[in-house]
Image: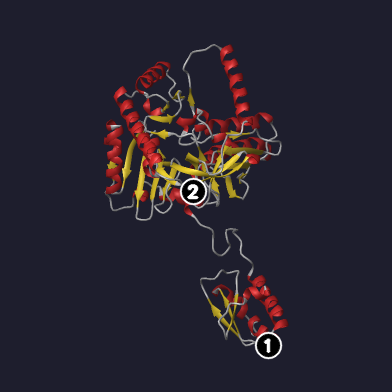
Amino acid sequence: MTKEIIINSTASQNRVAITENSNLVDFFVDHPEKKRMVGNIYLGKVARVLPGIRAAFVDIGLKHDAFLHFSDIGDKLEDMKGIFDDDESDFEDDENNVDADDKQKEKQGDVKKEEHREKQTPKLKKGEEIVVQIIKEPVKGKGVRVSSSISMPGRFCVLLPFDNKIGVSKKISDFRERRRLRKLARGILPQDCGLIIRTAAKDQTEESLSGDLKFLVNNWSEIQQRIKNQSPPSIVHEDLSTTVSVIRDLFTPDVSKIFIDSKKLYKEIKDYVQFFQPELVKRVDLYKSSVSIFEEFKIEEQIKKLMGVRVPLPSGGHIVIEHTEAMVVVDVNSGRYAAKKDQELNSLKTDLEASREIVRQLRLRDIGGLIVVDFIDLEDDKNRKKIYDELKKEFKKDRAKIAMLPMTEFGLMQITRERIRENILQSMHEPCPYCEGTGLVTKKSNVAHEIEEWLKRFKQENKSKPLILKIHPNLQDTLKRGRISFFSKLRFKYVFRLRMELDEKMSIQKFQFIDLRTGEDITDNYS
C-alpha cells in the first residue's frame, strides 16, 4: 500500500490530503482567518461555577466563555483522552506485571475512585485564576471545551506536567520494545512530569527521544514563565497550525512521500522534519508542476464528492448522509435485486458495502456526535451481527473515539463519534443567505400572498402613501406574469402608487416596503 500526504497551499487556505493507493482517506483544511484552537493553553479566570451541571465557565478572552466540565479538572492521565490523536488516549500503563486477580482488584479500586471523583465538587471559586487547555473547538456558536490537565504533544512523546505516569501506545505491541522505551523514558523524564510514548517512537534511539522530550520541557518552562508574568485572560501557548500538526501526528514511517506546492511551507515542514526525524527528510518533496497539485493527484474530484449528500456503493446501492440539529442520519438504499429469493443475501451485501463506506465517510468528513444509520432490513440475527462486526473492524482504522450499539429489529444502529472540531461541511460551507440553512425556500406564490397580506394591514391604517416594493429579481416574473399581472391587480385593488425595485442582494423569500417620501423601511411596522 502506498501512503502519501499531499499539501496544497494558497493565499486563502492550506489543504492537506492523505491518500492510500491514491484513495482519499483523510482531509484537513487550514483557514488563516480561522486558526486551529485545540491544544492552545490559556491563563483564564473562573466566570461561573454551576454545580447543577457539574461544570464551570472560564473567561479566556474569547467571544464565549470556555466550558470546563468537572470531569476535566484534575491531573489524572485519563483526563487527557481524545485531546490530540489516538496515541494519547490509546495507551497502556504497564508499569508492573500483575496477575489476573490483581488486575481485577485494581480495576475495582479504579471504579471506586472514579465514582468518588464524580461525587466530589472541585473547589472552584468565581474570579479564581486557572490554567486550561482547549480540547474541543467551538461548534454551532458554543464556546470551546477546556481541561485543566495540560498535555504537550511532541513527535515521539506527550509530556504531561504534574503527572507521574509513563504510558506506551497500544500500537507498539512488541513487549521488548515497550520495555525498552519505558526504561529510556524513566532515565530522561524530569520530576513531576508524566509521559505518553507515541507510536512514532518505535525503534527510535535514546538521542531522538531525549531531543523530543527536551524540546517539550523547554516549551513548558517558557509557558510557566508566561503564566507568572501575564494577567488573565491571556493565551500562554499557541499550538501548531493544522498543517504542521498533521505532519507531527501523521507523518509516520509508512508514509512514502509528502508533496507540497508552496516553497515557504515546504521549507517550514522540511525544517521541522529535519529537526525531529532527519531520516525521513528525503521523503519531503516540493511539487513544481504548473498543473494544480490536487488535480495531478486526482484529489479535487474526490473532495467534491465529499460535499454531496448521496454516496454510491459498488453494487449499485447508495447511502444518503443528512445533518440535523440533534444528529447525523445515514440512510442505506439498495440497488436492483437479482431475484426476490436472493433478497436477504443482496441486502446483506449492500449493508456490508455501506458499513465500510459509512466509516470512511465519517472519518473523511470528520463527522462527530450522534449518528443513526438506517440499514436495509435483515431478518437473520446472524446477518445483523455481521454488520455490527464489520463496522467494529472498520472503526479500528479511525483515530477518533467510537461507541456503538448493536442493530435493532428495525435495522437502526446508533453510533457516537468523538467530535473535536467542526466537520468538513461546516468548515468549507456557510449557511445559504436565501434559505438560511434549511435547504428550502418559500414558494414564490406564497411570497406573493404575504405581500398582499402586508398591503391589507397597511391599508387599514393608511389612506394613501406612495410605496416602493423591493424584491429579488427571481420574484419579478411571478408578480408581473400575465395580461393583467398580480402586481397591477395590487395597485388597482388597494389604490396605491406602488413602484417595484429589484435587489439581487435580497433573499428570494423576503420583501421590503419603503416609504417613497421618507425613504424609511416600514416592512416590520405591518408584518
**Residue nearest the viewer, comparing 260 with 270:** 270
Secondary structure under tag 2 reads: helix
Q: Position of residue 405 (x, y in %)?
A: 64, 33
Secondary structure under tag 1 reads: helix
* Circle 2 crowding by C-alpha within 10 Å: few under 14, some 14–19, many from 20: some
Which quarter shows the C terminus?
Answer: bottom right
* Circle 1 crowding by C-alpha within 10 Å: few under 14, some 14–19, many from 20: few
Q: Amino acid at mark 1?
A: Phe
Q: Position of residue 331 (x, y in %)?
A: 62, 45
**Residue nearest the viewer, comparing 275 with 210:** 210
Q: Is residue 72 left or right of residue 231?
A: right
> What is the number of the mark on residue 56?
none
* Residue at mark 2: 424
Q: Is residue 161 left or right of residue 119?
A: left
Q: Amino acid at mark 2?
A: Ile
* Residue at mark 1: 492
